[in-house]
Amino acid sequence: MAVTKGSDTHLGAALGLTDADLLEMYRFVALARAVDERMWILNRAGRIPFVISGQGHEGAQVGIAWAFQRGHDWIAPFYRSIATCLTFGMSARDIMTAQYATASDPSSGGRQMPGHYGSREHNLVSVSSPVATQLLHAVGIALAAKIRRTGQVAMASMGEGSSNQGDVHEGLNFAAIHKLPFVFVVENNGYAISVPAAMQVSVANVADRAAGYGIPGVVVDGSDVLACYAAARDAVARARAGDGPSLIEAKVTRLTGHSSDDQQTKYRTEEDLESGREHDALPRFRGQLRDAGILTDEIEAGLTTEIAATVEDATEYAEHEPDPDPALAMRFVYAEDAGTSD
Amino acid sequence: MPPRTFIDAIRETLAEEMRRDESVIVLGEDVGKKGGVFLATDGLWAEFGDERVIDTPLTESMIVGASIGAAVNGLRPVAEIQFADFIFPAFNQIVSEAARMRYRSNNGYSVPMTIRAPYGGGVHGALYHSQSVEAFFTHVPGLKVVVPSTPHDARGLLRSSIRDDDPVLFFEHKKMYRSVRGDVPDTDYTVPLGKAKITRPGSQVTVVAYGLMAHYALEAADRVADDGISVEVVDLRTLRPLDRETLLDSVRKTGKCLVVYEDNKFGGYGAEVAAIVAEEAFDYLDGPVTRIAGPEVPGVPYNHVLEDWFMVNPEKIADGIRTLAAY
């Protein structure tokens, strides 16, 4: 079935998504995967020293980020948020220059490890390594949005392991008391590096903890992009209406080791890894779009070519960008007066 | 304007800054209707309301972490940590997040936030209401650390701190809140961050101090003047960035340097001052750089005899000056 512009199928209609929306969402899922896979190749080839991956999280990230307004709302992401950052406006070059830690890396100018993305331009808060700290930043952003009456909603995302930190409790409590426009997203991939969720979280779902704050907590299948979008859309609507925060727990999978320095077969069985691969959003979303006649052979071929070219361009670009200059490493510890160079 | 107490200066400056700039908010424990446990924020809630004067839950990490976020999204939060002793749950947010946000984002983000906290002993506060915590934070690039000693400086430095585009820790010695008075100009003056002040000129010994110890140093200088010792007192006012020029100029003139701080001596802020003087003014020194500081116990004990034993006082400083002057 050929799809012409403006003719939308039933797949996204109930959610208010056009076929063009669905294709664009799929493009972000596939692009994030392709960029991520290239990162691992570059790491194993000795071109970049470290990779931390978002593989297995992309469907949830795109579905959820799609519900927020780019350039208006705020996201405090974490180190697996490649697809989130792409969906919210960062480019493949932006992601790849972070891997190479080039001077032009917009996240940090090569100062941070790869995975620590951020962009003032795109309202993506700079990521640090101590986990869950970003929840409080998003809560503070939501507080400012409420006081300044900007209509913005802030989201923070992290893994289920991180969700145990005290900052999460302090932040959810405050956000709930003040009905702040805040959405907390837990991307539960079942492992905190090597420790399974059953040894990390005392209840079946992180979302169960939402009841303790008197806020909605929902569990969604993280391989179901549209279910993730629907949950986020509801949470954003609630936040924007002044009804307060929500918690969304997306059950995702981690297709790679924790990082390029981890060998997950040491603590995960082959059956476990196989079931994880079966829970991958990328083939599932592709199948949905194929079945609905949205992702035609022609469109898919074009998309595949485009994504390959984008990844190639980003790699080539980052590979040839200069390193940061140590002579400038003292800059930006504090504000500099306008006009001074160092 | 009649003389103001130290806490008057702080409270009035907070109100003025909130009137001047609607992006300034105050948040912390009991800062609202109660006006803070020391009444440093008294009257702000009545004037500015719930949205700009926020009583938080007992969550120091949240107070600072949410202030960081609010600063990222256009506000200038003034967070109060009820006692400096309770700042440690927020240590990660201050050191890992606020201090590094600008650097790690290559100037993409900044955190214009002031954290106020009462510190110091001598008020029967025992181990957990008496600590001097400045050294934990002066160690950290990306933070500014301010310790005023007079109502004039408290006002001028608090204005500068709130208007600064980087995170500032503003430590107020609680014993000074109502015991220290002084003239305060009724103008919109500021005292720049990073500028020390010679509060007493002298020729034979430089005494470097800040906060309550800046007052005790002046008292000690009076006492030893009777012995014919001429003391110059440098009130640092800002600990980071340190005003090296004023410090080193004084030591190069007198040739002797005594550093006074209330915190326990080992690894305290005065150790850095001593190291800088030794490194950069060695050729001018006519005696060892010496420190008068607290004893090596993990907190200020409660009983008044024990507290007096702990606290640096003018007599201990005077003894240190006499010993150094005789070297």
Image (tube, rainbow, N blue to C red):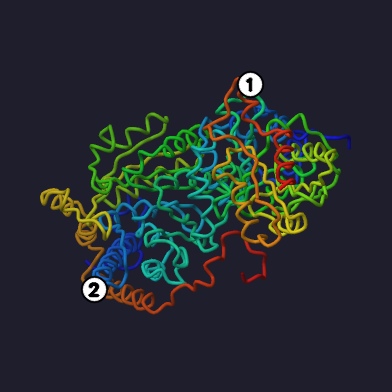
- Disc marking residue B305: 1
Q: Nearer the viewer, residue A248 or B36?
A: B36
Question: Image point 66% across, 54% down: which residue?
Answer: B242
Which corner quadrant holds the N terminus of chain B?
Answer: top right
Question: Image point 67% across, 60% down: which residue?
Answer: B281
Question: Image point 41% across, 48% down: which residue?
Answer: A130
Q: Is residue B190 visible?
A: no
The x, y position of residue A156, in whole percent, is: 42, 47
**Figure check: A153 above or below B173:** below
Chain ID of residue with mark 1? B
Chain ID of residue with mark 2? A
Mark 2 is on which residue type? Answer: Ala
Among the 4 quarters of the image, the one containing residue A285: bottom left
**Figure check: A302 above or below B296:** below
Instruction: Tell whether A59 sits left or right of B246.
Output: left
The x, y position of residue A8, in whole percent, is: 32, 60
- Disc marking residue B73: none
Q: Nearer the viewer, residue A186 or B213?
A: B213
**Figure check: A80 above or below A300:** above
Q: Answer few, some or many: residues within 10 Å of disc 2's Cα (few below 14, many 20 plus, some between 14 and 19).
A: few
Residue farthest right in this picture? B1
**Circle 2 or circle 1, nearest the eye:** 1
Q: Nearer the viewer, residue B168 or B171?
A: B171
Residue identifier under label 2: A301
- Are both tags, 2 and 1, on one chain? no
The x, y position of residue A255, in whole percent, is: 22, 56
Among the 4 quarters of the image, the one containing residue A132: top left
Q: Is residue B206 visible?
A: yes
Among the 4 quarters of the image, the one containing residue A185: top left
Mark 1 is on which residue type? Answer: Val
Instruction: Tell whether B166 sits left or right of A26.
Output: right
Instruction: Tell whether A232 sits left or right of A291.
Output: right
